[in-house]
Image (cartoon, rainbow, N blue to C red):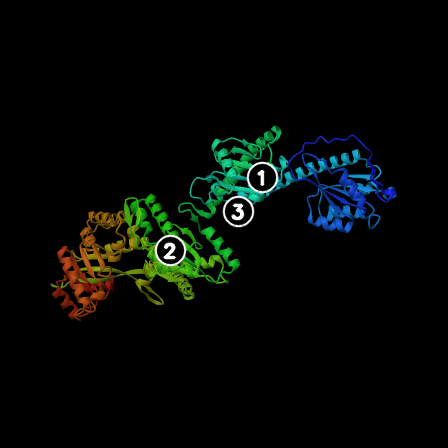
Amino acid sequence: MSISNHHDDDALQFVDEDFSITEKQGMGKDWPVLIVDDDPDVHSATTFALRDITILGRGIEFLHAYSGAEARQLLQLRKDIALIFLDVVMEKENTGLEMVKVIREEFGMLEVRIVLRTGQPGYAPELQAIRDYDINDYKTKSELTLTRLVTTLTTAIRSYDQLATISASRRGLRMIVDSATDLFGRRGLENFAAGVLTQISALVRLSPEGLIAAKAETAPHHTHVDDEPVIVGAAGKFRDWINHPLHDLQDKKIANALRQCLEQRCNIIDESCTTLFFSTSAERDIAVYLNTGEPLTAMDTQMLEVFCTNIAIGFENVDLFQQLNAYAFSDLLCNIPNRTRLLQIIAEQRQTGSAGWTIALVDVDHFSEINDALGHENGDRLLRAVAERLRGGLNKETILARTAADTFAIFGKNDHIDPLQLQHLFDTPFAVSEYFLRVRGTIGLATLDNGQNEQTALQHAHIALNRAKNDLRGRYCSYAAEMETETESRLTLLHDLRAAIEAQGLELHFQPQIDLHTGKIVGAEALLRWNTPQGMIPPDRFIPLAEYSGLIIDLGEWVLRSACIEAKKWHQNGFPDLRIAINVSMVQFRSPSFVKMVKQALEDIAIDPHLVELEITESVAMEGAIGLENLLNQLRGLGVMLAIDDFGTGFSSLSYLQRLNVDRLKIDRSFVNTLGAADAQTSIAEMIVRLGQNLKLTVIAEGVETEDQAQALRQLGCQEAQGFLYSKALPASQFFNWLKAH
């Protein structure tokens, strides 16, 4: 056979030869081979001669370019070419050499094999040029018999296959290495799995296409309703299935192969696919599905098994980092984002525009008391129940996070966050073990603007939450700029309060308590006062600060001891039966050492406990119901008397009041101010007096300022009173002089 073109010097001649191809016919994609030559006959002859050739189980796909310019255009579109037959002389005498430079340097095609052909030996490239341009072979067209052409083609394709395999392997390894720097990110496991797929595919000379499935616990961030394995990595056409459970996969054959592999804990190999099993030391099984198209050879199978065994430790490391990531960005108790992750989410939203978004902080009221009374396990159950209810009541686009022990954060669009709706979620009691707990939530809200960073936004929500707590628990409050000024003022005041306590700059004043029927002085209430160079700071300003900061614990002990010491002086100087009444904060009651502290103070001062009365407010008695009865019983066991202050303002449960072991009810001044006006206030005062009589409790009225009020109280049956009618609160020395004068 001979084929020639019209140029005798470019003649491409093939002699008749007995040539057979022994390569295995396969199912793979054909090898792309580009012919670049300005002679159409060369294209035809080459295509004809190599039309039935198969190499490594794959046929040949011929591509054609008739000039350097056409070759450039084609190479911009095709980067998968295995071999280029390149004519040296085309538009110019060195067009072929210029194209080599373009291929290697401009297009970065390093694996493609290049065979230069010329029919003009005088234009042959120098040896240095062949080395510099990475030219793989050089032939004159007259040298290329059919045998030599096939040999050149086979050698070049095999060389390309090896280089491509090495390159793909290197890319797979690079993906695995690169994923190590991303292990703390959400896609670390996915990147690692993709790298593994690329590496495995390179080992068996396949295009990267497959799936990696793992048991659900391998990927803690993935959400699914059961223990169905999850697709943690995928390549090729399967890429979109990452993070999906296996039962979502449309191709049930593949899903069943992966599931069977994991269940049977062994490799599964059939005619068209291979599914490999390997297990980590943590017993978290992994299955890898490869669309091989045909069974793997025994050598390939052994190689993959060795690879999977070695790479298993890589999955263990990735899994460890995923767990660390969960600890860093997730609240594991409630399975929601934590504060760190919330700040990230807010920052991400700011990048796309934060206008129209709100942060709401929801604080579970009196959680610490529930924790102390019912135990931490039940406290955790309550938090999970609150998180579940909040999550169920929120828009799907709204983020729920836990930012503190008993504080949840809600981040979403303004119209998706309604504080009243959030409060209604607390209307139904929470079932916790055998308890049905009725708790409330206090809410602080802040809207975002484009000028805020995430830290500032969260701080504003905290300021609003603290304001809501200070105003009244179970309420909500939205941030306003003036709150920040007030907060700064509060911090300054708190600093001054600390200094005053350390310098003993606070003092006690005493207001007498009078028997309404005899006019006899029966006791006195100790009231804390803070006098500064700028004037007197009212207790309703600094006491909440002391409670909030924890200073009230030490301050409360000082008040108790100082009041008892002063009362001891009265007893020793002519007033042996005078009672001292001391207010106690709920924060003090929460202290585990409160009873012990009271006991120690009584012993140290050696005062008669029956002359010491501890006052708690009605709201404290009602809101702190859990464990309060036991605490009051312990205090009564020390011999002290107990009173409920501000009675009538908290709408107490009468049945609960009966269970409290107290001695005295104190009518709030708001019900005393309008006595005699024939309105509901008189009725409430009368009700309290009758309630006290029925429960055999002494009733004392505070804020008595006129004789008419005193007379009205006497007529109602109230036993005791205190107020400006008798005396204002006086410093210790003045009070003692008042005692002696009366």
Residue 107 against residue 283 in the figure, above or below: below
Whole-percent x and y of residue 202?
63, 37
> Between 311 and 449, which is closer to the camera in this rendering?
311
Whole-percent x and y of residue 390?
37, 53
Q: In the rendered image, which quarter contains the C terminus? A: bottom left
659 relative to 184 in the view: left or right: left
Q: Nearer the viewer, mark 2 or mark 1?
A: 1
Q: Which residue is mark 1?
A: 197
Q: Which mark is residue 185?
A: 3
Whole-percent x and y of residue 340?
47, 51
**Label 2 Cα crowd, 10 Å radius (few <14 / some 14-19 / many 20+):** many
Residue visible at 20% across and 54% down? Answer: 657
Q: Which mark is residue 644?
A: none
What amino acid is found at the position of numbered circle 1 in the picture? Leu
Question: Which of the marked residues, 2 or 1, is nearer the chain's N terminus?
Answer: 1
**Label 3 Cα crowd, 10 Å radius (few <14 / some 14-19 / many 20+):** some
Whole-percent x and y of residue 45?
79, 41
Q: Which mark is residue 362?
A: 2
Residue 135 against residue 667 in the figure, above or below: above
378 relative to 346 in the view: left or right: left
